[in-house]
Image (tube, rainbow, N blue to C red):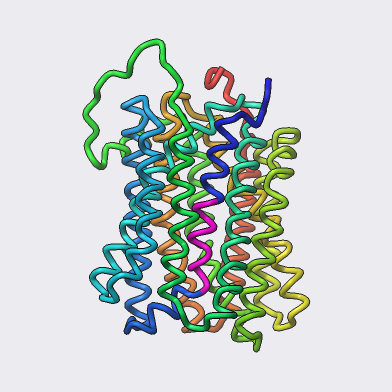
Amino acid sequence: MKTITRTVWILSLISLFTDSASEMLFPIMPVFLKSIGFSVVLIGVLEGIAEATAGICKGYFGKLSDNSGKRAPFIQFGYSLSAISKPMMAIFAYPVWIFFARTIDRLGKGLRTGARDAMLSDEATPQTKGKVFGFHRSADTFGAVLGPIAALVYLYYNPSDYKTLFLIAFFPGLAAIISTFLIKDKKRQQPAAIVSTPFFSFLKYWKVSPPLYRKVVIGLLAFALFNSSDMLLLLKVKQSGMSDVQVIGIYIFYNLIYALSAFPMGMLADKLSLKTVFVSGLALFALVYFGMAFTSNLYIFLFLFLIYGLYAAATEGVAKAWISNITDKKDTATAIGSFAGYQSLASLFASSFAGFLWFKFGAEVAFLSTSIVSIAVIVYFSLFNIKIYQNKVNS
């Protein structure tokens, strides 16, 4: 059986195009927002609302996708919303409009996440989930390499021309939209019954989900509650005296390592176990945050971000593969969407709490606290034996 199918290739290319557009704007977003009058507090509120919107919607639309038995419409509409949000932010430089455009972008992410990951899961067997999700993460993250490089080149020749960059970002987004129409839902023997899906109905899944799902997700969310935004790592690099070019260069370097490693890590997870590779990734994460607490050296930063890229490769796709293997196939989008939603909300707390610790006690305390919690999560996963596959599920 062919592991990387046509559908996996198309979904991976869609993610590559979309991430190229998003990451093209990531390095300049705070500067652009400040240039049109946003304060640091308002930027924080904007991102908080946007991420909360994505978080809540992931669970709901995942449940809706499972209930309807369809994946493709959610993927198509979700990626379309994210694409059109880019030029929207350049049209009117008013806070209310920016809030609207940014929320549209995150709504698109909420729409597509559960359905897309369920479609990826359907293309794999329990023994190849790591490879499939790892391949997708590699393609997605290559976009995070290409986007910032394109932004750096454009801004080198057109300094401070941020609005045009937002318009340029629409074109890879448009390529993603066109590509979504190449994917089709698999024909089902019986059409899915029409089921009412209240907005917060996905929350009920926790009670009926497999006990193993709850055990795993508790550990994942405990980690997410203290896994703050990568922006804090970049801020530490910047405050250590590095230039803007060096900071963006380190960010690109991290994404390159991540992109190159995600596929091999997924293959390794299939061979060893999803749990083993994921926990190893947490150990790398703990090492990075411990090191960030004490260094201000460029070469050590490069080493730590290399390790950080390996951590991301060992955890992001592997976590979704793990969840899809311990839940019923008919609930895949609900299970992944609900977890992704809880994770988004946990991340809001993580970044806020880390920012508070940094402000009150210094960067060292913020990074060391996160490192210690990640070690505690490693211990948690080591206390019980988690089967790689659940025999009665996905068979």
Residue 157 placement: quadrant: bottom right
Q: Which residues are magenta?
A: 17-27
Dominant secondary structure of the residues highlighted in magenta in the image: helix
Report x, y in % for residue 273: 70, 35
Residue 363 location in percent, x, y? 57, 80
Screen quadrant of the N terminus = top right
Question: Which residue is nearer to you in this view: 268 or 103?
Answer: 103
Instruction: Please state the horizontal and vertical placement of residue 37, each as a whole percent of the image.
Output: 32, 84
Q: Is residue 73 left or right of residue 130?
A: left
Left or right side of 251 for 32? left
Instruction: Farthest residue to the front: give it.
Output: 157
Q: How many marks?
A: 0
Q: Residue furthest bottom?
A: 241
Horizontal side, residue 367 vs residue 262: left or right = left
What residue is rendered at 53% in x and 47% in y?
A: 15
| Foreground of the two, 260 or 94 | 94
Residue 207: quarter of image: top left
Residue drawn at x 45%, y 31% as measured from the top left? 332
Q: Quadrant of residue 48?
A: bottom left
Q: Residue at x 23, y 71 (%)?
A: 96
The C terminus: image quadrant: top right
Confirm whether the magenta stretch covers residue 228. no
Left or right: residue 277 versus residue 352 is right
- Residue at 37% x, 48% y is 80
Viewer-side residue, 11 vs 113: 11
